[in-house]
Amino acid sequence: MLGSTVLEVAIGLTFCFGTVALIVTTIQEALASIFRLRANTLLAGIKSMLNDPGFTQLAQAVYGHPLVNPHGDGAAADERDLKSKPSYIEPAHFAIALVDTIQQNGPATYEALGSAIEQIPDPQVRRVLQGLYKRAAGLEQFQTLVAGWFDNAMERVSGAYKRQQLLISFLISLLVAIFFNVDSIHLFRTLWQHPVLSAGINGAPGALDQATVQAFMALPIGWTSFPPHLDNAFLLQVAGWLMTASTTLFGAPFWFDILQRAVQMRGTGSKPEEVARERRQAAGTTAAAAAAS
């Protein structure tokens, strides 16, 4: 019985944590789309890479290239004038766009490229490109080195973006935990006393649909009285909210993978209630057979 209780509690907790993480991911993706966070982060990274914080020199010219911004008109005089911002740029395309921008209307030769690099006004960018130019044996190799430089710069941008998203994810999950009163400590206590509450969970949901929300709301969550009393019990409730918010940082796939395994473990054997029921049915069948004989 103890093993069954532990398993049911684990199933209920992992389903709750996974569903909260799924809700948070959905909200976060919606916010990222509305505020164009990926595109703005990419633009900020390229502005920093090309040392053009005002978006008035090299970064502006590169963003006007059709390989970098195919939906733009190339006439944006300011960052606010950009009609579209790409969320992803192919490194090879960035390298070609940068070479075209540096050479402008000059001859497309490797020797002419070296002269064009010398004319770059920004000393930091000029020094980087001069170093890459000296190490390259030709235009194609130079573009490969520029693409590698872009990749390294974007890895740093991606790391900063992920750290920012982790903070946003934690704040959103904390708001969700407070809104639905998803108190992990209360949830654990209730499931331990009534493990049958998670008996209806049979697997990880494929999406955040109505069935998932109904199963989520069937768990011991939600408000019974609001506002809460500011006492020791409230402090414990806050700790439960923080615990719930922390678990969502692992992501919905992590929790649903654990949930799937836990459900499979439960399916490998009969529950104690089912075993007792089968024994009673078997005893009744035996008694009926004995009476008939």
Image (cartoon, grey):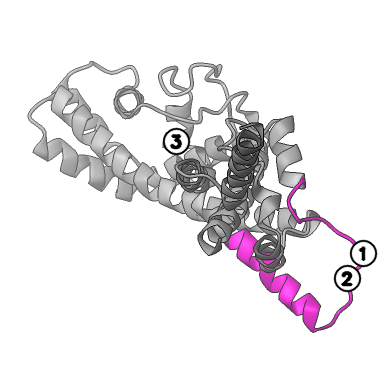
- Quadrant housing residue 65: top left
Residues at circles 3 and 1 in contact by the CB criterion of under 8 Å: no
Checking the image for residue 228, the label placed there is: 2
Q: Secondary structure at mark 2?
A: loop
How crowded pointer 3 is (Cα within 10 Å; few <14, some 14-19, many 20+) is rated as: many
How crowded pointer 2 is (Cα within 10 Å; few <14, some 14-19, many 20+) is rated as: few
- Image point (52%, 20%), residue name: 74
Q: Quadrant of the C terminus?
A: top right
Give the residues in magenta.
Answer: 218-246
- Residue 154 versus residue 72 in the image, above or below: below
Q: Please, what is the three-letter code of the amino acid marked with disc 3? A: Ala
How crowded pointer 1 is (Cα within 10 Å; few <14, some 14-19, many 20+) is rated as: few
Q: Please, what is the three-letter code of the amino acid marked with disc 2? A: Pro
Most extreme residue toward the front is: 293
Most extreme residue toward the right is: 226
Any magenta on residue 281? no
Residues at circles 3 and 2 in contact by the CB criterion of under 8 Å: no
Q: Quadrant of the N terminus?
A: bottom right
Between marks 3 and 1 in the image, the one whose residue lies nearer the viewer:
1
Residue 178, horizontal then vertical, whole percent: 77, 60
Q: Please, what is the three-letter code of the amino acid marked with disc 1? A: Ser
* Residue named by callout 1: 225
* Residue named by callout 3: 59
In the picture provided, is 177 more to the left or to the right than 275? right
In the picture provided, is 232 more to the left or to the right than 198? right
Real-space CA distance between mark 1 and mark 2, rounded to the nearest whole angstrom = 7 Å
